[in-house]
């Protein structure tokens, strides 16, 4: 086999791996979260959530304290929940589920990102780990988006998910305790929304 034929063979193998990954992650459209769509008619799926975060990243970067690589943030939010194809969605206030969350998701990351050609799989896996570590400007921005978007949808759907699960303000504040270090104005808006829904009886005050 000559060099041209060998290169063509390798390119075809690479394409097949990429196609396998693209087809596999279509399953994320069937992973439903606890957050309702803005109209409150049904719960959103992970694919819808990730798209919403990527679009929000384009709009909200100007409100972050640290400058972040927007492309990196967008890729990060687009892949951050792919592990839920295997691990399932762990509700934000599910304490029991949180105990095994990391173990389940690491195993899923190994399998799902392992479908890709090595360079792309390594890149996606590193971005996923960076998101999980919550240390870089990009990871902080991505986490803010991941937490702000459900809160906005809770507000739009009249606190439906909070009311269903009996969520307390203290739980929401604990989950979002690092948001002020990323954006004070977003944190102020989150508090405003929480207080509004305490008054409406959708969120418990303590």
Image: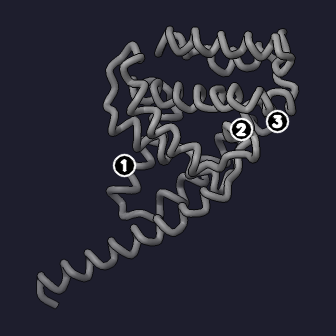
Q: Residue at x 68, y 29 (%)?
A: 156
Q: Is residue 100 visible?
A: no
The image shows a total of numbered marks equal to 3
Q: Quadrant of the N terminus?
A: bottom left
Q: Nearer the viewer, mark 2 or mark 1?
A: 2
Reading the image, the residue beneath label 3 is 96
Return the disc, 3 or 1, that comes first in the chain's sequence: 3
Q: Is residue 39 visible?
A: yes
Q: Residue placed farthest to the left in the image?
A: 3
Give the CA separation, mark 3 to mark 1.
Answer: 31 Å
Reading the image, the residue beneath label 2 is 35
Q: Nearer the viewer, mark 3 or mark 2?
A: 2
Query: Could you say where residue 115 lies in the image, as x and y percent from the top left?
Result: 47, 65
Left or right, residue 2 beside residue 40: left
Left or right, residue 66 beside residue 204: left
Tell me which corner region of the image, top left, top right, bottom left or bottom right, holds residue 92.
Answer: top right
Q: Residue at x 50, y 45 (%)?
A: 51
Q: Nearer the viewer, residue 54 or 7?
A: 54
Return the disc, 2 or 1, that comes first in the chain's sequence: 2
Q: Nearer the viewer, residue 3 or 163?
A: 163
150 over 167 or under it: above or below: below
Q: Residue at x 34, y 33 (%)?
A: 70
Left or right, residue 75 beside residue 153: left
Return the disc, 3 or 2, that comes first in the chain's sequence: 2
160 over 113 or under it: above or below: above
Q: Nearer the viewer, residue 185 or 71?
A: 185
| Helix, strand or loop for disc 1 | helix
Q: Residue placed farthest to the bottom in the image?
A: 1
């Amino acid at each position: 086999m000559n060099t041209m034929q060998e290169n063509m063979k390798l390119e075809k193998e690479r394409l097949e791996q990429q196609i396998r990954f693209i087809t596999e992650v279509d399953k994320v459209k069937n992973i439903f979260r606890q957050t309702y769509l803005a109209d409150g008619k049904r719960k959103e799926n992970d694919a819808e959530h990730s798209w919403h975060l990527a679009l929000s990243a384009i709009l909200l970067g100007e409100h972050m304290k640290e400058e972040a690589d927007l492309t990196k943030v967008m890729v990060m939010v687009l892949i951050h929940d792919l592990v839920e194809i295997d691990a399932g969605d762990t509700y934000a206030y599910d304490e029991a589920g949180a105990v095994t969350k990391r173990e389940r998701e690491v195993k899923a990351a190994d399998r799902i990102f392992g479908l890709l050609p090595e360079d792309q799989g390594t890149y996606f896996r590193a971005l996923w780990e960076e998101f999980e570590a919550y240390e870089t400007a990009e990871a902080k921005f991505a986490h803010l988006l991941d937490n702000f978007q459900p809160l906005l949808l809770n507000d739009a759907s009249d606190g439906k998910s909070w009311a269903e699960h009996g969520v307390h303000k203290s739980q929401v504040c604990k989950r979002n305790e690092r948001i002020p270090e990323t954006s004070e104005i977003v944190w102020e808006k989150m508090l405003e929304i929480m207080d509004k829904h305490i008054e409406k009886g959708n969120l418990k005050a303590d």
